Amino acid sequence: MKLFDYILLSLAVVFFIIGVDQVIRLNQEIIDTYWIFMMTAACLIWLNLRRTQQKEVTNQNKESKTKKKSSRPTQPPRK
């Protein structure tokens, strides 16, 4: 994971804790803190998208390396 991924995960945790604190300790309705929980969901979705894109890029790099190795012409056997 990169630094930005850690930041997104930390933000999601912080928003979730703040939302739960607002609901439990301050006795606010969930409707009033809905935007905080949506920020948590947005951070988690964004993190998931970044991880998926990074996996696709690494898979493409691995495939291109194997294609380069296999596309090398082989020498005919010596007699």
Image: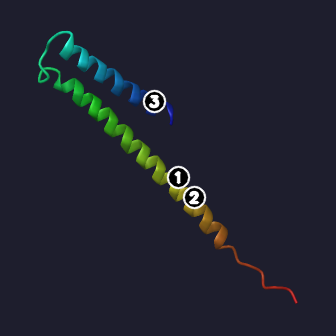
Residue 6 circle label: 3
Instruction: Tell me which corner region of the image, top left, top right, bottom left or bottom right, holds residue 6.
Output: top left
Instruction: Please tell me the numbered disc located at residue 62.
Output: 2
Q: Residue tagged by mark 1?
A: 58
Q: Earlier in the sequence, mark 2 or mark 3?
A: 3
Q: Seen from this angle, which residue lies furthest bottom?
A: 79
- Judged left or right of residue 13, residue 69 is right
Q: Is residue 59 left or right of residue 43?
A: right
Q: CA distance from mark 1 to mark 2?
A: 6 Å
Mark 2, Cα crowd under 10 Å, few <14 / some 14-19 / many 20+, is: few
Location of residue 61 with respect to 79 vertically, above or below:
above
Q: Kindly give the residue lying farthest to the top in the view shown.
A: 26
Mark 3 or mark 1, earlier in chain? 3
By what rule are the colours in the image chosen? rainbow
Q: Which residue: 63% across, 67% down?
A: 68
43 versus 63 height, above or below: above
Marks 1 & 2, CB-CB < 8 Å contact = yes
